[in-house]
Image (cartoon, rainbow, N blue to C red):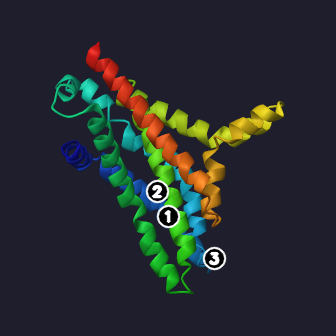
Amino acid sequence: MSAILRREFATYFRAPLGYIYLAIFYFFGGQFFSSVLYSMTNDISIIFSSMFSIMLFTIPLLTMRLMSEDKRLKTDQALLTAPVSLNGIVWGKFLAAFALFGIGIAITVIYFLILSAMASPQWNIFFGNLLGIILLGAALISIGMFISSLTESQMIAAIGGFAAMFFIFLIDSIASLIPISWLGDAIKQLSFTTRYNDFTSGILDFTHILFFLSVVVIFNFLTVRILERKRWS
């Protein structure tokens, strides 16, 4: 798994993709940070809550090539017959994307230190928000990687990723439009937005943590099943 992780992580920086992702993430993060400075507040939750919408459109950039590129280059058969388990392949690729995502969100530590120089630091709020964005990012990456495993086209994987992220963004709105109350409530239980907003509001709920971790495990498991079918076909 470590070999897969190193190879995939290095691939991000052998092509412009890794730099493009970080540039977009840092640009919008800087915009959010400047608005916080302009408002003369040290509430870093504003930055984290604003990053939700940006992640929905940047995560597909991380995941679109994870599985589809091997299919396009016809190197997937060599990978599937290599002395590494399918779980090792999937989790190695997942951790490579997650590592690059981690580099992106690490900038929030600098933001927090700057804000802390202006007023008393709110460490519990910062770590709660940081945990929330880490869990959200991991869940979205696992979904994007699963979509990438379904096609050999990076473009289709990216479009599919954007569509999935947009659907996630609309879950609450869709639930509110359903006239059947119990069905609407059931759909609301799938809301990423509500759970993430609780983190940014300083609410640390174990069920939210379990939800995001479950999404990671389920979609990585489904990606393994896709590779397993490919191996035996």
Q: Which residue is mark 1?
A: 130
Q: Is residue 7 visible?
A: yes
Foreground of the two, 23 or 148: 148
Which one is in front in this view, the residue at disc 2 or the one at disc 3?
Answer: 2
In 3D space, how far apart are the residues under numbered discs 2 and 3 (Cα atoms)?
A: 26 Å
Whether the residues at callouts 2 and 1 have beta carbons within 8 Å, the answer is: yes
Q: Which residue does the image show at 32% across and 29% down from the upper left? A: 68
Q: Is residue 152 visible?
A: no
Q: Which residue does the image show at 35% across and 43% down from the upper left? A: 94
Place of residue 58 in the rendered image (x, y in percent of width and height, measured from the top left): 45, 47
Among the 4 quarters of the image, the one containing residue 181: top right
Of the 4 image quadrants, the one containing the C terminus is top left
In 3D space, how far apart are the residues under numbered discs 2 and 1 (Cα atoms)?
A: 6 Å
Q: Which residue is mark 3?
A: 39
Place of residue 70 in the rendered image (x, y in percent of width and height, measured from the top left): 25, 29
Q: Which residue is mark 2?
A: 134
Crowd class of label 3 (few under 14; some 14 to 19; many from 20; radius 10 Å) = few
